[in-house]
Amino acid sequence: MPLARASGRKRPGAGLVVCHKTMPIRINLLAEAQNAEEMRRKNPVKRAIWVGSFLVCLILMWIGNLEWKIILERHDYSAIAANWQTNTAKYSAVTNEQMKIMDLDHKLAQLDELSTNRFLWAPLLNALQQAMVDQVQVVRLRSEQSLAREDAHDTGTGTNKQHLAAAMVEKLSLSIEAKDMRPADEDYAKFEKRLSTIDFFAARLQRRGFYMDGILGPLTVDPVDQSRQFATFTLAAQFPEVRHND
């Protein structure tokens, strides 16, 4: 079939167009370049770079968020640490006051124990009144009471060894000066025996009870009644030591 005359016009970007009598034939001269551009756009390396860049951005955003949280947490930590230091100082002050209060309570308890366990003279005078003997006149009642601190120490040996804690040791002694108006009847001995058997003294005194301190004095004329004579004597007693532990 004879070909028709072809026109020499070109369409921009379309290459050369050859017209046939029945239908046009279109030849794309840029097909190779377009294929190359399409392959470049579909290059997996470039896609990987974009994906990697996106992931890096996400990581940087996560790191930035984490750093911000760290800054906030450090600020909170500083506030908590400052509060802790303040509370620690207050706690130390409170504990010091508690220690002082405990020490005062301990001292008050010791004073209360000392006042509760102190020697009472009214029962002694009442017991002495019950022990009076005819022809015996009490002239003077004298006592010596002392408190001495005793350090902790051991007593005894072997199986009998004991440890005594430090304590305040209270010692009390009693002496009774009296006149025997009938020394021939030895009323002073009766008075001594009577004192040792009174319940108050028997329960509190050591086994020795009352004893003669010194000797019976010489006969002396009674200045009130010249016809009478008397002899002076002294009875003594030692009360057991009382330990007030620290």
Image (cartoon, rainbow, N blue to C red):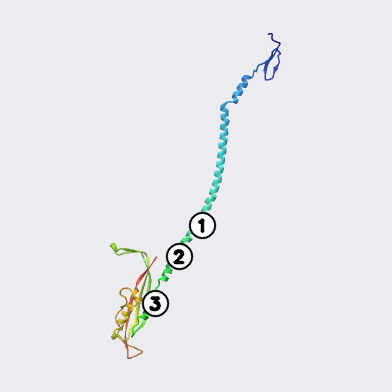
Q: On the image, which quarter does residue 218 sit in? A: bottom left
Name the residue type under label 1: Lys
Q: Is residue 238 visible?
A: no
Name the residue type under label 2: Asp
For disc 3, the marked residue is 123
Under circle 2, the secondary element is: helix
Of the two numbered discs 3 and 2 in the rendering, the one whose residue sits closer to the viewer? 3
Name the residue type under label 3: Pro
Q: Residues within 10 Å of mark 3 (few under 14, many from 20)?
A: few
Q: At which x and y percent is residue 37?
A: 61, 23
Q: On the image, which quarter does residue 220 sit in? A: bottom left
Q: CA distance from mark 3 to mark 2?
A: 30 Å
Q: State how many labels appear.
A: 3
Q: Is residue 90 visible?
A: yes
Viewport quadrant of the N terminus: top right
Q: CA distance from mark 1 to mark 2?
A: 22 Å
Q: Residue at x 45, y 65 (%)?
A: 105
For disc 1, the marked residue is 90
Viewport quadrant of the C terminus: bottom left
